[in-house]
Amino acid sequence: MCANFKPLTLLQLQQLHLPNIGFSYADEVYPMGMCPLLFQAEQQMEWREVMFGLVPKWATDLGIAKRTYNARHETILQKPSFQASALKYKFGVIPVTEFYESKYIENKPQRWGVRRQDGRAFFIAALYEIAKIDQQIIRSASMLTMNAIDHPMMRDFHEPGDVKRSVIVIPQQHLQAWLNWKNPNIQPFVEGFPVEEFICQHVPKEKMIKLSPQLNMFE
């Protein structure tokens, strides 16, 4: 499952004709890192800066985000961390340039990246929440995942014997429908992304992650 990704860039934002983003964020995001989330406000789509890892309203500290950055769509109504958000239809997307997974080669994990062949950003389905901890408002989100045992690309990831999972990609033509979805059953959007539109490559992890803001030019 996805624990590390690159958010969309300024050029990709312009290609998608999306609203400007009024905050900056890192080039790469890990659990508890901040990233942009797109959701449907009353009249239009809006951006929010969210923590990667959903923090439910009942949480007493942020550490839970280290365990809630992915949510299995099959169990969001049974899991206490996600149930309230799902019942209130708090659906959004996290646009990414590339996400990373582990592929085991000769029993050793390697970091591989998945991105679109045309270089455009794509939308990963997300569940979000707003909580308050120690008088601080916390906005957070989790990427929704699906079974990937039959997906030609995603079934090759994770340690041999582990359950095969994939993030749920929302095609751009279905973006409005997803953001306005008012049903905790999201099965109509659960579909493996088209392999022919994506590329998967070995991306060794850099020794030092660049933490400079990605989108400070929006301000």
Image: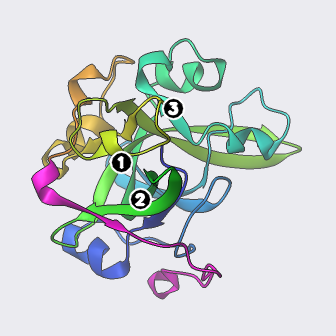
Q: Which residue is mark 3?
A: 71
**Residue 149: quarter of image:** top left
In x, y percent, where is residue 133? 83, 41
Of callouts 3 and 2, the N-terminal one: 3
Of callouts 2 and 1, the N-terminal one: 2
Q: Nearer the viewer, residue 103 or 121?
A: 103
Of callouts 3 and 1, the N-terminal one: 3
Q: Which residue is mark 2?
A: 99
* Residue extending farthest front: 106
Query: Which callout, 2 or 1, points to the residue nearer the camera?
Result: 2
Query: Which callout, 3 or 2, points to the residue nearer the camera?
Result: 2
Q: Is residue 75 left or right of residue 208?
A: left
Q: Is residue 165 left or right of residue 88?
A: left
Q: Which residue is mark 1?
A: 124
Kind of residue indicated by mark 1:
Ile
49 over 194 or under it: above or below: below
Circles 2 and 1, Cβ within 8 Å, touching? The answer is: yes
Kind of residue indicated by mark 2:
Phe
23 over 78 or under it: above or below: below
Q: Secondary structure at mark 2?
A: strand
The residue drawn where x is 57% and y is 79% is 206
Q: Which range is magenta?
A: 195-219
* Residue extending farthest top: 78
The residue drawn where x is 31% and y is 52% is 123
217 is within the stretch colored magenta: yes
Report, in whole angstroms, how far the alpha carbon at label 3 lies from the one at label 2. Answer: 16 Å
The residue drawn where x is 17% and y is 42% is 174
Kind of residue indicated by mark 3:
Ala
